[in-house]
Image (cartoon, helix red, strand yellow):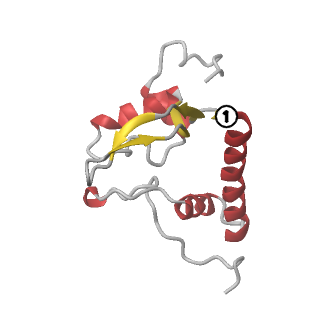
């Protein structure tokens, strides 16, 4: 079968399986499948390449600049951890943990709002299923000013 030939895509809810409380980790394949459902005229090969390139660009920005900001999603930042004392949990032996870098993530206000809105839902992550993120956040956190027809800033 050609990569350009559409075939059955796995059905993923909003990236997580919500039936029976079983949660799945979001994978690149799930992202590709979601994009293909919304844009079926693009081949799987092209969509996968765009997803891979997106992650590569984030990695390049982290290595080169130490941060990558995705508006409406969050910011990845490289932090430097200093050397510290530690111990082997199996043997209890003391050891030194060398200085190293780690990647931290800070969620945007939109993402934080969605996560907090889903806390009262019986299924985590289900508060905005089937809605565009911006529409979901607007509805759940609307202010009288935001509801004015002249306010297009949101």
For numbered disc 1, what is the local secondary structure? loop
Residue 147 relative to residue 89: left or right: right
Q: Mark 1 = which residue?
A: 66
Give the quadrant of residue 119. top left
Q: How many numbered discs sit on the rendered protein? A: 1
Give the quadrant of residue 47. bottom right
- Provide residue 7's location: percent of width, then percent of height: 59, 78
Residue 118 relative to residue 3: left or right: left
- Provide residue 25's location: percent of width, then percent of height: 42, 57
- Provide residue 151's location: percent of width, then percent of height: 63, 17
- Provide residue 37's location: percent of width, then percent of height: 58, 62
- Nearer to me, 93 or 54: 93
Q: Is residue 129 above or below residue 77?
A: below
Which residue is located at x 37 percent, y 59 percent? 17
Residue 38 relative to residue 138: left or right: right
- Nearer to me, 123 or 150: 123
Q: Residues within 10 Å of mark 1 (few under 14, many from 20)?
A: some
Which residue is located at x 52 percent, y 36 percent? 104
Which residue is located at x 29 percent, y 47 percent? 93
Q: Where, quadrant-wise, is the C terminus in this rendering?
A: top right
- Nearer to me, 56 or 72: 56
Q: Is residue 35 above or below residue 138?
A: below
């Amino acid at each position: 079968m050609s990569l350009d030939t559409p075939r059955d895509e796995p059905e993923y809810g909003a990236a997580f399986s919500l039936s029976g409380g079983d949660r799945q980790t979001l994978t690149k394949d799930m992202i590709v499948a979601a994009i293909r459902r919304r844009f079926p005229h693009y081949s799987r090969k092209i969509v996968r390449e765009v997803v891979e390139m997106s992650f590569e660009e984030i990695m390049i920005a982290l290595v080169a600049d130490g941060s990558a900001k995705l508006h409406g999603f969050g910011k990845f930042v490289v932090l430097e951890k200093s050397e510290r004392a530690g111990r082997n949990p199996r043997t209890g032996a003391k050891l030194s943990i060398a200085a190293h870098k780690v990647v931290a993530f800070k969620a945007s206000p939109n993402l934080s709002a969605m996560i907090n809105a889903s806390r009262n839902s019986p299924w985590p992550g289900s508060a905005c299923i089937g809605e565009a993120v911006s529409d979901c956040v607007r509805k759940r956190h609307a202010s009288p000013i935001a509801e004015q027809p002249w306010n297009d800033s949101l």
